[in-house]
Amino acid sequence: MDEPTVQNRRRAAVAVVSAVYPRALAAGRRSGTAAVAEYVSTATRRAIDDLGDEVDPDRTVRDLLDRLVVAAQEESLRARRPGPGGVADTPLPRTYLAACRTRGHRHDVDRVAHAAVTAWSHGYRDGWGEAYGATDRIINAIRHDELAATTALAGTPTLRWLDRLATSAHRIADSDPQNHPNRLAQLAGPDGLATELPIASREQGSTTDPAVESGPENQPGRDQHGHRRG
């Protein structure tokens, strides 16, 4: 095969990837963020429902948890809004390389189809993975509040409870986006957060020993900001 033909096919594959990937990324971002936001909202609403006036007479804890639900809803809405294109929407080199590997495809239409499928699967998966950072933004909406340091959930400091909730949501963000929602709920972990939520209580003037955070810099495939690596 002559060099011009090879170059033309590569340019065609690159063009297809450049056109498909941003759309797939946006779709994955919307779906992944919606998944973690729904998980956090559901878990938090259950905790709110378990509270009573005897435990939380001034609604201090319930108001704090209400803010977490609002943060989850706002994050989900933000992911649905189309934003300006940027470097973050650019396909990673691995996507271009995979799209150009067309051994066994004899016809140009097959090569184009291969590039399109590759771009979509990579983009959707990368977009879904951005739900990891979305989880952090949701949790941080109340995690640094003073109230989070002076409340407890069935004896567990709220900060630690929030970290457990974040870990469960992170598992969803790091999972295969093709999994069924029920499977994603199972991936949230056997730690009980998905089905058993502790009761919150106000501890006036108490001090807590927050759980050690598992930051994104310790997660495979992510930098210190939770962004995907090439």
Image (cartoon, grey):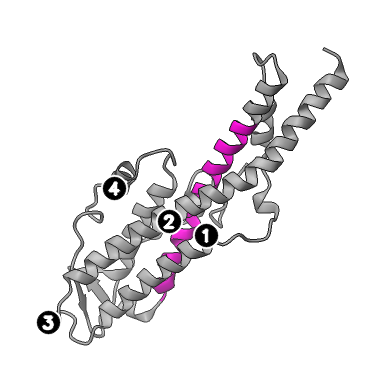
Up-down: is 175 above or below 10?
below
Front-lying residue, 162 or 129: 129
- Residue 16, image x, y percentages: 70, 36
Above or below, 174 against 69 in this view is above
Which segment is the magenta one? 116-144
User: Viewer-proximal residue, 42 or 175?
Assistant: 42
Kindly check if marks 1 and 4 are in contact, taking CB atoms under 8 A apart as contact: no
Label 4 or label 2, whichever comes before in sequence order: 2
Question: Residue at the location (52% across, 42% down)?
Answer: 125
- Alpha carbon of mark 4 to alpha carbon of mark 2: how far? 18 Å
Closer-to-camera residue (35/172): 35
Q: Which mark is residue 189?
A: 4
Q: Earlier in the sequence, mark 1 or mark 4?
A: 1
In front of the other: 109 or 48: 109
- Residues under labels 2 and 3: Cα distance? 34 Å
- Residue depth check, mark 4 versus mark 2: number of the one nearer the observer: 2
Q: Amino acid at mark 2?
A: Ala
The reply to whether the magenta stretch includes residue 122 is yes
Q: Can the viewer see residue 101?
A: no
Which residue, given by chain and number where applicable, does mark 3 sit on?
54
Q: Secondary structure at mark 2?
A: helix
Tell me the residue at 52%/59% (across/down).
80
Which of the labelled discs sits on residue 5, or is there none? none
Residue 115: in magenta span: no
Tell me how far mark 3 sits from mark 1, CA to CA.
38 Å
Give the amino acid type for the residue marked by disc 4 in the picture. Gly
Q: Give the mark nearest the N terminus, 4 or 3.
A: 3
Q: Nearer the viewer, mark 2 or mark 3?
A: 2
Circle 2 sits on which residue? Answer: 34
Q: Quadrant of the N terminus?
A: top right
